[in-house]
């Protein structure tokens, strides 16, 4: 598994796409947080990173599929997937190696955003007037959300040898799971009866719950379940593809 992990990490940093994706994430996040008046924290009267944690999931729903679209699509396209299988590695080890490489890349995107936390911390009046506990909870929620997006991106890459198709499939699933159930719950025949239950199926409900600064085991179990589900689907798809 770690052989695949190291191979994919090296592959990410040897490709220009990884630097472009990380750069675009930080640039867009910075512009929205500091420049555009509808989002800029400079126009708010209190020290908060709410803008970062409300914008980041939307950006990640595009950024992570762009990072992971090569994971299996490239292997399938160039016929190197069969070569991987001949090595002393199980399908699960291959899938997990690529998954953890994708999670690390998502963390690489997040690390520069700590500079925004430091800036808000210093700009607060008095200095340090920011709810660090809520920020920590929000970062934890974002890490869990991004890991789920990675598992979806890995699955999307496994079911298509075309990278553009893999990107579109993964992006669609990410948005459907994050926003779909919220808007579904607003339909007239669900509203007032099953709307709360339907919202709990969506990622945004559990992400927002963690972002409030306290941990609920149900939220953690939810994100772990999403990860396990899509990693299982990826492994199952690969087995069927290779041995059918």
Image (cartoon, rainbow, N blue to C red):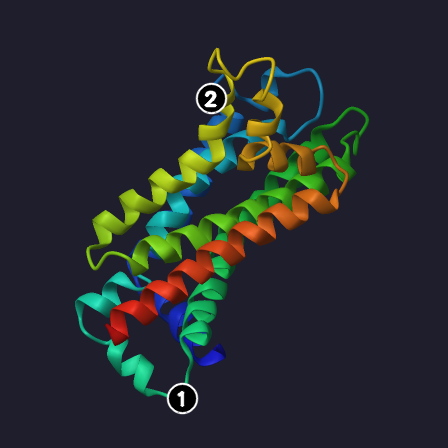
Q: Which mark is residue 117?
A: none
Characterize the local packing of mark 1: few (<14), some (14-19) or many (20 or more) Cα atoms within 10 angstroms. few
The image position of residue 174, as x and y in percent, is: 42, 41
Would residue 240 be visible to someone looking at this image?
yes
Describe the element under mark 1 as helix, strand or loop: loop
| Vertical position of residue 191 compared to residue 3: above or below | above
Describe the element under mark 2 as helix, strand or loop: helix
Q: Nearer the viewer, residue 72 or 217?
A: 217
The image position of residue 186, as x and y in percent, is: 50, 16
- Is residue 222 rendered to the left or right of residue 153? right
The image position of residue 197, as x and y in percent, is: 60, 28
Residue tagged 1? 88
Would residue 19 be visible to someone looking at this image?
no
Q: Nearer the viewer, residue 114 or 52?
A: 52
Considering only order in the chain, which callout, 2 or 1, is on the residue closer to the N terminus? 1
The image position of residue 237, as x and y in percent, is: 33, 63
Residue at the spot x=45%, y=72% of the render?
Answer: 92
Quarter of the image containing the C terminus?
bottom left
Total numbered labels placed on residues in the image? 2
Q: Which mark is residue 183?
A: 2
């Amino acid at each position: 598994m770690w052989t695949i992990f190291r191979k994919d990490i090296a592959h990410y940093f040897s490709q220009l796409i990884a630097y472009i994706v990380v750069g675009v994430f930080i640039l867009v996040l910075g512009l929205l947080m500091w420049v555009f008046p509808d989002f800029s924290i400079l126009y708010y009267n209190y020290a908060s990173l709410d803008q970062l944690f409300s914008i980041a999931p939307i950006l990640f729903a595009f950024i992570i599929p762009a990072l992971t679209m090569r994971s299996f699509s490239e292997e399938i396209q160039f016929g190197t997937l069969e070569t991987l299988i001949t090595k002393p590695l199980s399908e699960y080890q291959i899938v997990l190696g690529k998954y953890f490489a994708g999670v690390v890349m998502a963390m690489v995107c997040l690390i520069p955003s700590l500079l925004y936390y430091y800036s808000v911390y210093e700009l607060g009046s008095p200095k340090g007037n920011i709810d660090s506990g809520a920020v920590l909870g929000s970062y934890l929620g974002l890490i869990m959300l991004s890991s789920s997006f990675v598992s979806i991106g890995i699955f999307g890459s496994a079911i298509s040898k075309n990278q553009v198709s893999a990107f579109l499939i993964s992006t669609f699933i990410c948005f459907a799971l994050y926003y779909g159930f919220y808007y579904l719950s607003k339909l007239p025949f669900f509203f007032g009866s099953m709307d709360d239950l339907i919202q709990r199926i969506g990622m945004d409900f559990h992400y927002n719950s963690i972002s409030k600064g306290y941990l609920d085991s149900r939220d953690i179990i939810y994100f772990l379940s999403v990860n396990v589900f899509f990693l299982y689907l990826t492994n199952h798809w690969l087995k069927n593809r290779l041995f059918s």
